[in-house]
Amino acid sequence: MIIGVIKNTIMITSFVLVIMLVIEYINVRSKGNWLINIEKHRWLQYLVTGTLGVIPGCVGTFAVVSMYIHNLVSFGALITALIAGFGDEAFVMFALMPVTTLKLTAIIFIIGITGGFLTDYFMKGKSIIPKIKLHFELHTDETEHDIFNLRKIWIGLRNISFPRGSLLGGILLIILGIVTNEFSEGPGHKSWDWEQISFLVVMILGLIIILTVSEHFLEKHLWDHVVKKHLLKILLWTFGALLFIEIFKTQLHLDAWIKSNQIIILLMAVLIGIIPESGPHLIFVTLFISGSIPFSTLLASSIVQDGHGSLPLLAESKRSFLLAKSINIIIGLIVGLTGMYLF
């Protein structure tokens, strides 16, 4: 159990950090111009984060959480992604019930955009919205343009610094682990899937950035602004949350809880959806396939749960995590109860 928790922690933490490196890199290289376009078009934020959210797996949600942490998107746009995403269960659901899963995806995409818009509308100017300090720093005097200069890359490797060496070594180990299926769950060889390929592509992109940027860029932007401020926090919170979830699941038999009327099952589906983990939601997928629960209960569970996607949010801002989950619970209950009584 502990080995699996450690592997998942390493994968989640490394992916989130590399996404942050990429965002930091794009921001500084563009001198913040792309941020202006995103911030001026709120509906574009909902569409982008909703699209990222419905991508099967936790990759898209991780990216949106990273964007929110850097104040690139609004809190409502974050809500859109968290509602639209239902984590790794999407792969199983598409395999077991593809038509129903496509229907579910379309519905939660619309609900996510609607929920994000209403969240921003009603909470506009309210102090209850968490304020996260902007971590980006724009350096308009950056003159580095020849980032793929092989001579500079060779000089950087020949006189490698501790930050560059640490980042290169860490990412190379992660890439090696992905290629050799070291992070796969369970014994034996695991065939490559879309999410595994995505993780590998992101790691290679991070590797290219670390190899090509100048020492100043690497130390001031990537090392100081991203690694030092986020690594330990995300690592510890992710490990703690995953360990707690594993202990929780091995001590309690969740199937025994779902033996009452549909209202209680709906409430349990929404509450279990709070858990930032891919797995518990499959209980309700199985119950739906067997005909034990209505579509509205599965929909409510999908709205509230988001796989591992919200773990980095929990690490960065517990208030944001709790507020986001509270809003999703309310939306999930409203949708679930409405569907239960109307259909």
Image (cartoon, helix red, strand yellow):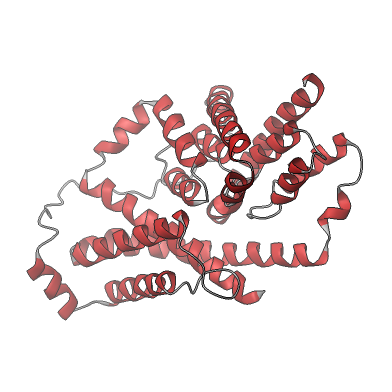
Please, is residue 228 above or below residue 101 in the view?
below
Percent position of residue 272, x then y: 74, 48
Residue in the image at 38% along x and 70% along y: 175
Q: Nearer the viewer, residue 62 or 297?
A: 297
Is residue 97 something one can see in this rendering?
A: yes
Percent position of residue 319, x then y: 61, 46
Percent position of residue 157, x then y: 18, 76
Quadrant containing the C terminus in the rendered view: top right
Residue in the image at 71% along x and 32% along y: 330
Percent position of residue 42, x then y: 42, 26
The answer to which image quadrant residue 254 occupies is: bottom right
Q: Nearer the viewer, residue 98 or 229?
A: 98
**Left or right: where does residue 189 sit relative to residue 217?**
right
**Left or right: where does residue 286 sit relative to residue 35?**
right
Please, is residue 268 above or below residue 127 in the view?
below
Q: Nearer the viewer, residue 29 or 124?
A: 29
Is residue 128 something one can see in this rendering?
A: no
Quadrant containing the N terminus in the rendered view: bottom right
Please, is residue 76 above or below residue 274 in the view?
above
Residue in the image at 68% along x and 35% along y: 299
The answer to which image quadrant residue 324 occupies is: top right
Please, is residue 212 above or below residue 266 in the view?
below
